[in-house]
Image (cartoon, rainbow, N blue to C red):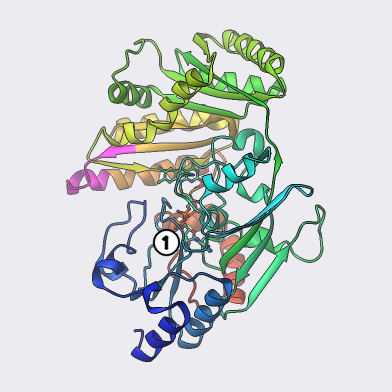
């Protein structure tokens, strides 16, 4: 329970207008973009929106002294309930910390506060010919702090990697309010443990990220998009493997199964060939048109060898946008198919992609639930979406059994519970199975060392 005295201290730190206390305001911070049900118990007692690292530090010092739970929050686009304040307390929203502090063109780095939107950072760097590659589909609203805290990935991960591949340094406020600066602009740095990696993907459970120093690379000069249709998902996956084995690394390679294609077709009133069972959308990039032409020809040859039925190369930016619109609209199109959609995020070794999809098909039949499968075929990260009606208790039971089996299938083929969305609340029950006893004990020891009073995002991960 936050006392009146503590409330006064909090208001004094951020100003009363940035300490939200009405019932309605607090309700708005009790959920995120996951399927964690809305519960009155998840309402924070107070929402605070600091502007500076000093304010965050003072707030954490107060929270530490009074042992108040603190749930850091960016844009709440998380899919696993990470920013839901399970134990009330303070919802610490970083959305006012939106300064891009420095773009260092010589060192090719950018320093940004936690609340900067991913797309704003991308656009800012792009004006100087510099490229920040991590591009979660949520980039129009997600924040850099949230991306670092979840180690977000995106469609371009196959060639360019994920957020952690670009984090060179972090400013983090620790549980007791201490401000830690870790990493820096030196490209090589093995001085002590790699703390920036530890905080990246820590889901707000180890510290509050207030600023990130991020690596940039030169912006590719040309981009092209290809759409390839197949008579089977195996043929689509085989194309991705053979491309990579032949040294053709696309910037993105997104795959959709038949259920997903039908969803898009229905949504956008498109005709689809009944024999098409899978579709690949590939992005290529390079220095000039000749480089794109060479890659296109090589990919077309590989796809043909693997039995492709249709090959379409965008000839203009408009055509390219149209092809990508299909993939970008997929999440909404699939969601429109049923009252509820439970979207998961498993990651498997690339060669296990067809096998895990076969297992998901079997689960779909066993539990009589349609499951759309799409994802980043280039890096083995798939998003099976269970389409269902959770208002029906009998169906809800089947859904949970199906989800359990999807996770078991991912682990059985050597994969993991999450490729990019994190563990949060929704995957907590499976973490011991994924990490093993020693893994879990090590994680808990780290947590204990950094957050001895357990005030940072309690109830998450395990
Ligand atoms: C339509 C849609 C598409 C998506 N596509 C992708 C995708 O392609 N790839 C992908 O990786 N994810 C995707 N996501 C998930 C989500 O957008 C990412 O996890 C994103 O990184 C979350 O950012 P956020 O600012 O919304 O963070 P929030 O959801 O607010 O928080 C996420 C977690 O990070 C913690 N956190 C937030 N800010 C901080 C901070 N400053 N310091 C410490 N901890 C913090 C929170 O406590 C929470 O645990 C998608 C989500 C949606 C809704």
Q: Is mark 1 within 8 Å of ligand 1?
A: yes
Question: Which residue range is magenta in the image?
Answer: 386-398
Q: Is residue 233 visible to us here?
A: no
Q: Residue at x 49, y 56 (%)?
A: 431
The x, y position of residue 119, in whole percent, is 52, 44
343 is higher (above) or lower (below) than 147 = above
Quarter occupied by residue 44? bottom left
Quarter occupied by residue 440? bottom right
User: Residue lying farthest left?
Assistant: 392
State left or right for residue 422 relative to residue 364: right
Q: Residue at x 57, y 59 (%)?
A: 99
Is 142 within the magenta?
no
User: Residue lying farthest front?
Assistant: 127
State left or right for residue 418 relative to residue 305: left
Question: How many numbered marks, from 0 up?
Answer: 1
Give the labeled residue for mark 1. Answer: 83
72 is higher (above) or lower (below) than 262 = below
The x, y position of residue 255, in whole percent, is 48, 26
Is 392 within the magenta?
yes
């Amino acid at each position: 329970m936050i006392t009146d005295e503590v409330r006064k201290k909090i208001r004094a730190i951020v100003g009363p207008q940035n300490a939200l206390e009405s019932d309605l305001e607090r309700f708005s911070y009790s959920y995120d973009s996951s399927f964690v049900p809305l519960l009155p118990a998840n309402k924070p007692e107070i929402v605070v929106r600091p502007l500076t690292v000093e304010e965050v530090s003072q707030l954490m010092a107060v929270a530490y002294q009074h042992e108040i739970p603190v749930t850091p929050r960016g844009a709440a686009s998380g899919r696993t309930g990470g920013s839901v304040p399970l134990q009330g307390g303070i919802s610490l929203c970083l959305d006012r910390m939106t300064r891009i502090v420095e773009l260092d063109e010589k060192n090719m780095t950018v320093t940004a506060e936690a609340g900067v939107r991913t797309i704003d950072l991308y656009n800012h760097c792009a004006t100087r010919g510099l490229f920040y590659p991590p591009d979660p589909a949520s980039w129009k609203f997600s924040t850099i702090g949230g991306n670092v805290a979840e180690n977000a990935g995106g469609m371009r991960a196959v060639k360019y990697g994920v957020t952690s591949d670009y984090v060179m340094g972090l400013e983090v406020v620790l549980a007791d309010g201490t401000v830690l600066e870790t990493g820096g602009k030196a490209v090589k740095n093995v001085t002590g443990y790699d703390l920036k990696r530890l905080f990246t993907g820590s889901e707000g459970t180890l510290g509050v990220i207030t600023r990130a120093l991020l690596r940039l690379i030169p912006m590719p000069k040309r981009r092209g998009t290809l759409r390839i249709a197949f008579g089977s998902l195996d043929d689509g996956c085989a194309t991705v493997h053979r491309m990579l084995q032949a040294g053709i690394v696309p910037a993105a390679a997104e795959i959709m199964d038949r259920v997903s294609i039908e969803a898009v077709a229905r949504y956008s009133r498109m005709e689809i060939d009944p024999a098409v069972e899978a579709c690949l959308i590939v992005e290529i990039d390079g220095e000039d048109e000749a480089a794109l032409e060479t890659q296109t020809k090589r990919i077309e040859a590989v796809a043909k060898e693997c039995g492709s039925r249709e090959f379409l190369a965008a000839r203009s930016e408009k055509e390219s946008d149209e092809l990508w619109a299909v993939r970008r609209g997929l999440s909404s199109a699939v969601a429109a198919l049923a009252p509820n959609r439970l979207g998961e995020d498993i990651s498997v070794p690339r060669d296990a992609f067809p096998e895990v999809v076969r297992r998901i098909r079997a689960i779909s039949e066993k539990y009589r639930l349609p499951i759309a499968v799409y994802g980043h075929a280039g890096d083995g990260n798939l998003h099976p979406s269970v389409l269902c009606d959770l208002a029906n208790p009998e169906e809800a039971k089947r859904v949970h059994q199906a989800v359990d089996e999807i996770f078991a299938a991912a682990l059985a083929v050597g994969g993991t519970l999450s490729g990019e969305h994190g563990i949060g609340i929704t995957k907590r029950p499976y973490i011991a199975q994924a990490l093993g006893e020693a893994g879990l004990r090590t994680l808990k020891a780290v947590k204990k060392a950094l957050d001895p009073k357990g005030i940072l995002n309690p109830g998450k991960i395990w």
